Image (cartoon, coloured by chain):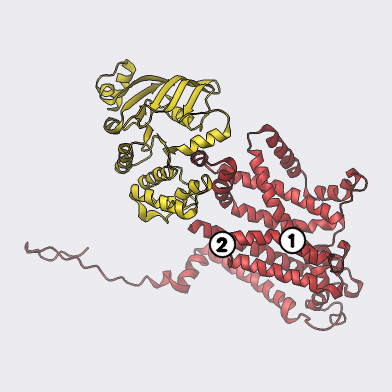
């Protein structure tokens, strides 16, 4: 399923928050259909890295090219990339004043100028895909955490993205709800969408990832296919981290 | 506890719920209410007795002054000096001046028509008979035909602005004040949070000085000093200058209220909107503002009420608004000695309008909570 087409390319990317060096010399190439899980201790720059891909954070040095478009200050390019890259957040970030259906149709209607009827049709399809079509007319506050996160996934899918970014999608969930969200993500992975997922769900990494990346101190320490990564880490830092979370 | 019947071992025990009994008589109904609210302990009972005594002292005289001994019909000779009751005839006689000032009597249908439309639209708003988008559009369109009706021109006899006054002037200043200062305040609040340094400094440079001076100062500046600075030939009339002063003053306060609401929106909302490919203006107009304004409805209504009451300050710069007309009427030599009636009526009208706004604000809040 993985082709040679390059979807994301990060070349010598450096980023600072004020004087704090958060990303150091990041080099990463993601091919179409790849499923990458990024793990590492908190503060290691995982979230910052994926937030740079759709320019929620701005990098200061190096180049980031997404689906052939380079991220620069050009606003048109940024909007174009954002509408091709879906993102799911740790804290869901649904729009609380809109119903579930309105949350899903919002971007297709306002960013893509899609007719309402068509947007609703697509939204209903994705709600069924994440298995909550019956909640369409409720407000986000009336749903459980797991349901909200599945809505957030459906909302991103409605823009028909080529790449999905997940920023710790299950960290804010009760243990019982983690599975329902992971199930949806596994299904997505099996459909061949390019995915980058910041997560500590090592079970998920083993089942779906074709590459696992370990970060510490703003650097990519180690990257490998999951079997090797978990059974045969090359760096002491990786081994220490794995021994603590497994 | 249910007393356990002997258990034979062959079947399950059957649970029978006890019947509900009525609550003790002292805790419910009128007696219960009295006991919990008015006679709950000796101190509370004492307060109740004192309060009842005070009411007994004040309410009957007030009622007899305002209603039973009041004079409801007749002319200026109907209430001789020293008469005990309220002289409502005075208010009836002055009613037209209080409402529209010195507006010419033969053209009275024009402010009456405008007033009728205004009250209708207010009722439609309060009763929610129309969808919000259309209502807002109507409110913003209304000032134009109203101005034409009141001022004349284009086929209607022109009426000079010095003749406008009374409640009509107060409501006009307040309505246009709210309609323009709210959007202006929103823009100022957004500008104050802008990353563009020049936009931010301009907005802070407007908000802070305006908030730092009393409205009276602004009205004086608008009325007396501004003409000195205007280029020769450019002549903005007094009423318009005062209206601009009121709008600026109100916008600065609205801006700070709205800014409070904007600060309550989590950064995640911006992240989510951005990640879906929405630009700044769409995110602001459709995601951020609807939530932010909802948070500050009570304060915004408070600002509207304050603005309406503040219009009574225009008397300082020579405009005869409602309060100005009340004052002028009380000094009419033909009707001397009726200040009390004049100011009671004035207070009553202000209270009715402000209280209605306050209730409407409450109902808006409740509606948003239900969603």
**Farthest residue, direction right:** B232
- The reply to whether discs 2 and 1 touch (Cβ–Cβ < 8 Å) is no
Q: Which chain does the red colour mark?
A: B
Q: In the visual, does B366 lie left or right of B319? A: left
The chain under label 1 reads B
Q: Quadrant of the C terminus of chain A?
A: top left
**Farthest residue, direction bottom:** B74
Residue identifier under label 2? B363
Where residue A50 appears, x then y in whole percent? 44, 30
Residue pictured at 28% horizontal, 26% vertical: A226
Along the viewing direction, whichever of A7 and B254 lies nearer the viewer: A7
Same-subunit check for callouts 2 and 1? yes
Q: Secondary structure at mark 2?
A: helix
Residue pictured at 82% horizontal, 47% vertical: B217
Categorize mark 1 by other alpha carbons within 10 Å: few (<14), some (14-19), many (20+).
Answer: some
Q: Secondary structure at mark 1?
A: helix
- The CA distance from mark 2 to mark 1 is 26 Å
Residue B265 visible somewhere in the drawing? yes
Q: In the visual, does A229 lie left or right of B49? A: left
Residue identifier under label 1? B143
Residue B165 visible somewhere in the drawing? no
Q: Quadrant of the N terminus of chain A?
A: top left
Where residue A83 appears, x then y in whole percent? 48, 39
Of tags 2 and 1, which is closer to the observer? 1
Q: Which chain does the yellow colour mark?
A: A
Where residue B256 appears, x then y in whole percent? 66, 45
Along the viewing direction, whichever of B90 and A175 lies nearer the viewer: A175
A193 is higher (above) or lower (below) than B130: above
Along the viewing direction, whichever of A213 and B115 lies nearer the viewer: A213
B296 is higher (above) or lower (below) than B272: below
């Amino acid at each position: 399923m993985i082709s040679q087409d390059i979807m994301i390319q990060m070349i010598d990317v450096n980023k600072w928050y004020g004087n704090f060096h958060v990303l150091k010399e990041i080099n990463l190439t993601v091919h179409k259909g790849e499923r990458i899980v990024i793990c590492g201790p908190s503060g290691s720059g995982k979230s910052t890295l994926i937030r740079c891909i759709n320019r929620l954070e701005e990098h200061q040095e190096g180049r980031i090219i997404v689906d052939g478009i380079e991220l620069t200050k050009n606003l048109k390019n940024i909007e174009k990339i954002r509408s091709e890259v879906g993102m799911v957040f740790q804290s869901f970030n649904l729009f609380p004043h809109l119903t579930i259906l309105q949350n899903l149709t919002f971007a297709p209607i306002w960013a893509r100028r899609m007719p309402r009827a068509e947007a609703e049709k697509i939204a209903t399809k994705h709600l069924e895909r994440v298995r909550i079509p019956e909640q369409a007319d409720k407000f986000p506050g009336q749903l459980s955490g797991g349901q909200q996160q599945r809505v957030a996934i459906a909302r991103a899918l409605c823009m028909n993205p080529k790449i999905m970014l997940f920023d710790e999608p299950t960290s804010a969930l009760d243990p019982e709800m983690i599975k329902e969200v992971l199930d949806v993500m596994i299904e997505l992975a099996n459909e061949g969408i390019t995915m980058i997922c910041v997560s500590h769900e090592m079970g998920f990494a083993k089942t779906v990832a074709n590459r696992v990346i370990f970060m510490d101190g703003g650097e990519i320490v180690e990257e490998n296919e999951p079997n090797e990564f978990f059974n045969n880490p090359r760096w002491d830092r990786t081994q220490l981290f794995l021994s603590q979370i497994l | 506890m249910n007393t356990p019947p002997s258990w034979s071992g062959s079947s399950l025990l059957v649970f029978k719920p006890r019947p509900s009994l009525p609550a003790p008589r002292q805790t419910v109904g009128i007696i219960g209410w009295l006991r919990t609210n008015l006679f709950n302990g000796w101190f509370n009972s004492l307060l109740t007795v004192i309060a009842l005594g005070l009411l007994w002292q004040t309410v009957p005289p007030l009622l007899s002054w305002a209603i039973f001994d009041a004079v409801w019909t007749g002319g200026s000779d109907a209430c001789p000096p020293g008469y005990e009751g309220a002289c409502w005839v005075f208010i009836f006689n002055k009613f037209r001046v209080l409402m529209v000032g010195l507006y010419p009597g033969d053209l009275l249908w024009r402010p009456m028509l405008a007033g009728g439309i205004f009250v209708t639209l207010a009722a439609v708003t309060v009763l929610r008979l129309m969808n919000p988008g259309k209502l807002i559009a109507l409110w913003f369109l209304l000032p134009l035909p109203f101005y034409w009706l009141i001022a004349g021109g284009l086929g209607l006899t022109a009426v000079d602005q010095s003749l406008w006054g009374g409640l009509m002037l107060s409501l006009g200043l307040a309505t246009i004040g709210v309609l323009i200062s709210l959007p202006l305040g929103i823009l100022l609040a957004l500008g104050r949070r802008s990353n563009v340094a020049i936009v931010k400094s301009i907005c802070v440079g407007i908000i802070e000085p305006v908030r730092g001076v009393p409205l009276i100062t602004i009205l004086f500046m608008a009325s007396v000093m501004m003409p000195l600075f205007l280029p020769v030939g450019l002549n903005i009339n007094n009423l318009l200058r005062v209206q601009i002063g009121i709008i600026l003053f109100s916008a600065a306060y609205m801006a700070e209220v709205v800014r409070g609401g904007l600060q309550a929106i989590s950064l995640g909302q911006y992240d989510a909107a951005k990640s879906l490919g929405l630009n700044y203006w769409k995110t602001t107009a459709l995601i951020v503002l609807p939530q932010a304004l909802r948070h500050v409805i009570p304060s915004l209504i408070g600002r509207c009420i304050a603005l309406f009451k503040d219009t009574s300050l225009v008397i300082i710069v020579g405009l005869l608004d409602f309060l100005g007309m009340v004052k002028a009427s009380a000094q009419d030599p033909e009707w001397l000695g009726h200040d009390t009636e004049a100011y009671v009526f004035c207070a009553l009208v202000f209270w009715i309008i402000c209280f209605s706004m306050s209730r409407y604000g409450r109902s808006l809040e409740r509606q948003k909570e239900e969603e």
